Amino acid sequence: MGAFMFRPTKITDHLPRARCLLNGLLIVFFGWPQPGAHAEIQNNPPNIVIIYTDDQGSLDLGSYGAEDIRTPELDAFAREGIRFTNMYAPSAVCSASRAGLLTGMMPNRVGTPTNVSSVRGKSGMASKFVTIAEYLAKAGYRTGHIGKWHLGYTPETMPNAQGFQYSWGHMSGVIDPYSHFFYWEGPPAHDLWRNGREIWESGSQFSELAKEELAQFLEKEDERPFFLYWAPTTPHYPLQPSPSTLSLFSHLSEPRRSYAASLAELDNLFGWFRRKLSSEGFSDNTLIIFQSDQGHSVEERAAWGAGYAGHMRGHKASFFEAGLKVPAIFYDPIRNSGEPGSRDAIVSAMDWLPTLLDIAGVSDTAVDIFDGRSLVGVLADREETSPHERLYWQLGNDSRSAPWAVRAGDWKLLGNVYETKPPPGVLPLNKADRQLFLVNLRSDPGERLNLADSQPRKVEELLAVREQFLMSIQSSVGDFDDD
């Protein structure tokens, strides 16, 4: 097992005095929360499981309205728990989204503004940032990662150095499910690891191997509460469901057929997992979060896309709604965090870290300033409003050319707009639309009408909000570059 290091730090510990002052002003402006003043873990802390799927479409569960797929286990889970209808991913690509989830901070702030390299020996998310696994391990949890990583391929940036005491899976963005090779960049490279050591299981299906790993993790005799980050590869390409599952969807055409079958297999695995929790005596005290990392892919390797987003515009790598808005379900069987049902408040996957620390009773004086905010109030009250006045996304470091978006209330402004596959009946973006695209999501949830020309004051207002975010990012990210 790789060495575990807890790296408590404050952003202000690494900033010159002027930058500290600037960050302080921005904290006031944005209202970012500070955790409590002491380190502790409450009595009977919950086990915590985060299941972060890969390229799952915004509405691709039966409980979200998809009628041509079969997800009875997850649909039942949604009925028991809390289903979010306005959950935003931290980014529209895999690495950046995962960085935001695990650190509670904007991906650009932690040096992961887009996907990191899938080549062995290349670093990824800045290792000086503290992950949720590190917070919980320091508080007495045993921690595990199973599945996809895609946040760095060096000893310093692989899971065991980021707070995970146990890790199994692949480090790159995608592997073939049977050979476990990465085929999509440079020469083919084998990519399957356990605790920092390469292992070989050629011919065994990745999801079946993951099932064995999950079972072993749950069966381990250990009195400590556990935190499990399970990152399935489904439904990321290449889609290779079993023939028996594929036959259940013969009424669908490809690639939707393979996509639906792959989600059905994930649903079966999820049902097995919950039964395993019960048989091991964990079901009464295990909090589970299930959600996607971003919207569906329309890449060539994904056969130009098979995900479902309803009326929404966008896809993976796009900041239109279907690139960012994802299915998300929260379930806490013992603390009764809130009445089951839907939550319409605007939230972000960055919020899970401060939320889980709140629920577990974990706090520390030396923690980062989160961009995420605790959702305890939203979980408890379905009428609770969003903890965010503003949200910002940027895909890349260069603020002049990178796609970006800012949301404030019902208004959303996109710049350097990226869209490769508009919805049926929607014309491709023209040059002006690609520069700035302003939409009111209450009156135009499908993001069809660009109001940038007719609402110049709103454009200027949102541009000013964006500048505040850029100042905040620039004031901190450079001081956290790896040595």
Image: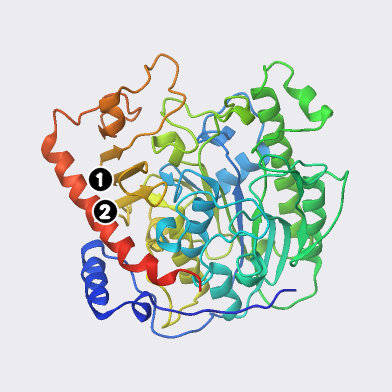
Q: Does 382 sit above or below residue 240? A: below
The quadrant holding residue 47 is bottom right
Q: Is 262 situated left or right of 58 in this image?
A: right
Taking the spot 41% from the left edge, 73% from the top edge, the residue there is 368
Q: Where is the N terminus found, in terms of image quarters?
A: bottom right
Q: Position of residue 402 (x, y in %)?
A: 37, 44
Residue 21 badge: none
Taking the spot 26% from the left edge, 68% from the top edge, the residue there is 27
Which amino acid, mark 1? Answer: Gly
The first of marks 2 and 1 along the sequence is 2
Confirm or deny contact between disc 2 and disc 1 (CB under 8 A): yes
Taking the spot 51% from the left edge, 44% from the top edge, the residue there is 93
Secondary structure under tag 2 reads: loop
Q: Nearer the viewer, residue 141 or 67?
A: 141
Q: Is 188 situated left or right of 313 in this image?
A: right
In three-dimensional space, the C-alpha distance between marks 2 and 1, rounded to whole angstroms, equals 6 Å
Which amino acid, mark 2? Answer: Glu
Residue at mark 1: 409
Residue 154 visible in this rendered orientation of the protein: yes
Q: Does 97 sit above or below residue 473? A: above
Q: Nearer the viewer, residue 136 or 432?
A: 432
Q: Is 305 situated left or right of 275 in this image?
A: left
Q: Does 399 sit above or below residue 297? A: below
Residue 44 visible in this rendered orientation of the protein: no
The quadrant holding residue 370 is bottom left
Q: Position of residue 361 (x, y in %)?
A: 49, 76
Residue 389 badge: 2
Q: Position of residue 421 (x, y in %)?
A: 47, 24
Q: Is 125 situated left or right of 380 in this image?
A: right
Q: Nearer the viewer, residue 323 or 292?
A: 323
